Image: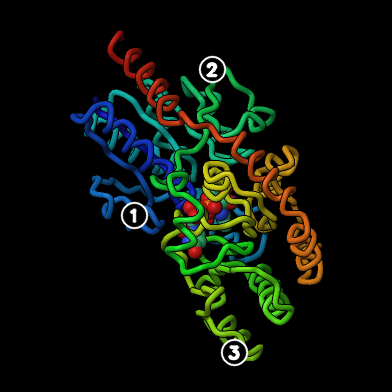
């Protein structure tokens, strides 16, 4: 089977494409893959690192606010739009895929559009509860739409079947026992908080944790705490801790720029305080952990708030919009959950009940349907 995968820009679009490739490879080890991305997006690093070939094409989004800089950017976007169809056809003619799958990001637009017009069976995967512009457009042309959550359906006008597949999570996320994870981290059996703000960190979460950590340490509460401050907090967060007299690594503390062992940290945690990117939420569901979610307000269509509300509405998370997420408010929420561990455990169960445990099979079923369609042509 020859599979073309297109997606790019952020890890949020590329990692699902890589996960889909792994699922296909597991079922069909002889499958051949070609990724299509932009030369400057994160895909240019992540895809070759995962060992897959990639063709590139230039694409850019249109800016709505008309400043001089944006007019220049829009001129570039028009040029790319004019040349992208030719490039897309060239890539498709060379690789001759049986099927094509888009996982979002501008680059998926021209290539999936061209593939659909050439009669190649196509599908898209939408990671968020509020779909991106590319997927919304492509949904009218493809043969199948895969969704992480059913809620996204409200925003699509579909002419084709859909499957709620969930979002593939990294191996190991739900596999570890809480006690073993704590032992590995050197923690005791008090409450364990895990906080982080996406791969780069989040100013708002760092500001809150700069108060939350000294609060529970100075009060002597029985709390273990892991915090990932990200590149964004690299200069400021360790200084804030030093000023408060808090060590970055103590008996109950592990404060680091990036959390590399998220599987262990999630398993150890009782409460997670974080943004609401799609992968993070799928991981919270797989691990079955209660959370305080502070959606990033600067993402397209405010999709992180839509994502967070799926868990919030199910009672699996407390959702606090960034404008309301003062350190004092976060401390108050943590204090309540510290005092009511049963509620926290219940939130974890509710998160687990949202998990789609057979995501891999659901995705493979869609792929198999597309391939059958390709072979029957
Ligand atoms: C800022 C932004 O536009 N984010 C979007 C991007 O997600 P983006 O990839 O930035 O964020 P996600 O929450 O989807 O994934 C973050 C990943 O990084 C991991 N992690 C994070 C911090 C850390 O220290 N260690 C670590 O391992 C998390 O466990 C998770 O697996 O695409 C997603 C899918 O379209 C969207 O839902 C997000 O809104």
Q: Name the residue under label 3.
A: 242
Image position, residue 99 (x, y; %): 33, 25
Does the beta carbon at disc 1 come under 8 Å from ligand 1? no
Relative to 370, 156 lies left or right: right
Q: Nearest to the eye among marks 3 and 2: give it.
A: 3
Image position, residue 63 (x, y; %): 61, 54
**Element class at badge 3:** helix
Q: In the rendered image, which quarter contains the N terminus?
A: top left
Above or below 312: residue 115? above
Q: Name the residue under label 1.
A: 46
Task: Identify the residue at horizontal 59%, vertical 66% (top origin).
Answer: 69
Q: Tell me, for residue 137, which label it has, or none.
A: none
Task: Identify the residue at horizontal 59%, vertical 80% (top origin).
Answer: 237
**Element class at badge 2:** loop
Q: Nearest to the eye among marks 2 and 1: give it.
A: 1
Q: In the rendered image, which quarter contains the C terminus?
A: top left
Gap between marks 3 and 1 measured at Cα = 35 Å
Q: Nearest to the eye among marks 3 and 1: give it.
A: 3
Image position, residue 133 (x, y; %): 59, 40
Nearer the observer, 288 or 363: 288
Which of the marked residues, 3 or 2, is nearer the chain's N terminus?
Answer: 2
Relative to 365, 225 lies left or right: right
Gap between marks 3 and 2 measured at Cα = 57 Å
Which of the marked residues, 3 or 1, is nearer the chain's N terminus?
Answer: 1
**Element class at badge 1:** helix
Nearer the observer, 236 or 376: 236
Label count reads 3
Q: Name the residue under label 2.
A: 160
Marks 2 and 1 in Cβ contact (< 8 Å): no
Task: Identify the residue at horizontal 74%, vertical 48% (top origin).
Answer: 343
């Amino acid at each position: 089977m020859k599979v073309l995968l297109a997606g790019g820009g952020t890890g949020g679009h590329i990692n699902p494409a890589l996960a889909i490739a792994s699922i296909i490879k597991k079922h069909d080890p002889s499958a051949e893959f070609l990724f299509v991305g932009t030369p400057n997006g994160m895909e240019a690093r992540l895809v070759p690192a995962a060992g897959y070939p990639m063709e590139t094409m230039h694409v850019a989004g249109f800016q709505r606010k008309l400043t001089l800089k944006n007019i220049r950017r829009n001129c570039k976007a028009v040029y790319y739009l004019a040349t992208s169809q030719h490039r897309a056809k060239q890539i498709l003619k060379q690789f001759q895929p049986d099927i094509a799958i888009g996982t979002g990001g501008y680059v998926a637009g021209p290539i999936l559009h061209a593939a659909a017009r050439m009669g190649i069976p196509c599908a898209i995967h939408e990671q968020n509860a509020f779909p991106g512009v590319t997927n919304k457009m492509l949904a009218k042309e493809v043969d199948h739409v895969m969704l992480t959550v059913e809620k996204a359906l409200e925003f699509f006008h579909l002419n084709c079947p859909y499957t709620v597949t969930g979002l593939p999570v990294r191996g190991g996320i739900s596999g570890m026992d809480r006690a073993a994870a704590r032992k590995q981290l050197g923690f005791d059996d008090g409450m364990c908080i895990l906080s982080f703000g996406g791969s780069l960190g989040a100013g708002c979460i760092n500001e809150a944790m700069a108060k939350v950590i000294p609060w529970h340490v100075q009060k002597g509460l029985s709390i273990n705490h892991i915090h990932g401050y990200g590149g964004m907090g690299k200069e400021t967060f360790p200084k804030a801790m030093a000023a408060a007299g808090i060590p970055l690594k103590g008996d109950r503390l592990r404060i680091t720029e990036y959390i590399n062992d998220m599987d262990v940290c999630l398993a150890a945690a009782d409460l997670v305080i974080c943004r609401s990117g799609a992968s993070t939420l799928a991981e919270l569901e797989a691990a079955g952990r209660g959370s305080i979610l502070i959606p990033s307000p600067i993402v397209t269509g405010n999709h992180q708030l839509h994502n967070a509300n799926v868990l919030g509405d199910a009672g699996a998370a407390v959702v606090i919009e960034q404008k309301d997420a003062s350190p004092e408010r976060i401390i108050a929420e943590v204090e309540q959950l510290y005092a009511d561990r049963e509620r926290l455990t219940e939130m974890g169960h509710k998160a687990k009940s949202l998990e789609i445990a057979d995501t891999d099979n659901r995705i493979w079923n869609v792929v198999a349907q597309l391939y059958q369609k390709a072979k029957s042509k």
